[in-house]
Amino acid sequence: MALIRLLTRMSEYVHLKQGLECLGASSQSKRLQQHTAAHSSSCNYQLLPDCLELSYGGLVMHFDYVWLRDHCRSASCYNAKTNQRNLDTASIDLNIRPSKSRADENSLFLTWPDGHITRYTLTWLAQNSYEGQKRSAVQPRILWSADIYSSAQVPSASWDKFMSCDEELKNFLNNFLLYGIAFVEGVPPTLEATEAVTQRVSLIRETMYGRMWNFTSDFSRGDTAYTKLALDRHTDTSYFQEPCGIQVFHCLRHEGTGGRTLLVDAFHAADAVLQRTPDNFELLSHVPIKHEYVENLSEHRNHMIGIGPVINVYPWNNEVYMIRYNNYDRSVINTVPHDVVRRWYTAHRQLTAELRRPDNELWVKLKPGKVLFIDNWRVLHGRESFTGLRQLCGCYLTRDDVLNTARSLGLQA
Ligand SMILES: C[N+](C)(C)CCCC[C@H](N)C(=O)O
Ligand SMILES: O=C(O)CCC(=O)C(=O)O
Ligand SMILES: [Fe+2]
């Protein structure tokens, strides 16, 4: 339900934006004359002055001629073994037009002025067209409140199966992609086993905190994470130009009270802002914000800077793909004038209010054996203050490799 709502709201928003953009467009793109029209039993196409129009499978698509030449998959233009382009795009005449064309049941054939023939399958064109891409769904995900997540009763993976069975890994990754969090249980409470469980999924992303880290409240580093204090919800490494994609936590021991982990789906909160106040969503997704990490200990000197909006959306479909939210590490705002700053604070307040709604807070107590994977681009984490000795180990993972593993198992990612 939540997903469908997101999809419809998102596409309404994109259409609204495109409508506004169209108002400013010149009339140059109006079709002037029809050059060639043809049809096979399965498709219709016309060579218009500025593009090829193709109707196929209930979709009307438009392809630029340079694009068509550039996307030739013949053996001389494209290496099917490496899936890499051989053709030098810069050698294409920018005014190129096909000299001949024909279509059959499955394919469209274009002959170019130098005699080179390109064959496109109609399904390939449909899948790779702008119009087809717009119709396809955004990354399937279930936006959650604490209730939605709890009621879904998402099973944890179990260590033995996870390490040996691809189906278990696939289910785990499917849940991770849907919810932005996933658990493996029964893991031996050691750093080594934690490392092994993460390497089943991806490559470890080493940072200035190390490769695998194992920390307590000893203030060994210049950051509040290394204390017993509560930490409000946040994403980590917001001060990297590319924040770490995934964070892994394994609590190896805790002899004391408190210390529960807080998890909040920030995509759900961003969607609420988009639905209620699109202007605020717009500000949060456009105003560049600086985050900074300055550490000045004798053994650790670091200065990291990352700049980007709080809500990051793909420009072609407005799908949210990353949230950067860390009020501790947010730096000076000097990227926009004061009146925009004022409106940004209002928008940020609304997002914060959504993130702080008690019904959006999922609280879990991490125990030895239970490893938590968090999508650090989507789900915020925090912690309750605690007493006693508490030891947490984990690491960051490279996002590309997590998605690569998911795709290799047949998942959409
Ligand atoms: C996870 N580990 C303890 C290694 C690092 C914590 C980093 C904390 C930092 N303020 C941030 O939010 O990025
Ligand atoms: O201690 C915790 O549970 C988490 C602290 C934290 O936010 C972090 O290490 O990134
Ligand atoms: Fe953190």
Image (cartoon, rainbow, N blue to C red):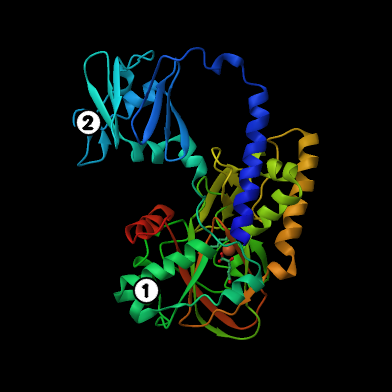
Is residue 33 in sight in this rendering?
yes
Tag 1 residue: 168
Q: In which quadrant of the rendered view does residue 268 lie? A: bottom right
Q: Is residue 14 above or below residue 165?
A: above
Q: Residue at x 36, y 55 (%)?
A: 404
What label does residue 223 carry, if any? none
- The extreme front residue here reads 41
Ligand 1 quarter of the rendering: bottom right
Q: What residue type is labelled 2?
A: Ser
Residue at 63% of width from left, 71% of height from top? 148
- Type of the residue with mark 1: Glu
Q: Is residue 153 left or right of residue 396?
A: right
x and y percent of residue 134 in the render? 51, 41
- Image spot of residue 71 (x, y percent): 32, 30
Between 141 and 371, the one nearer to me in the picture: 141
Answer above or below: position of 59 versus 171: above
Q: Which residue is drawn at 57% across and 54% down?
A: 295
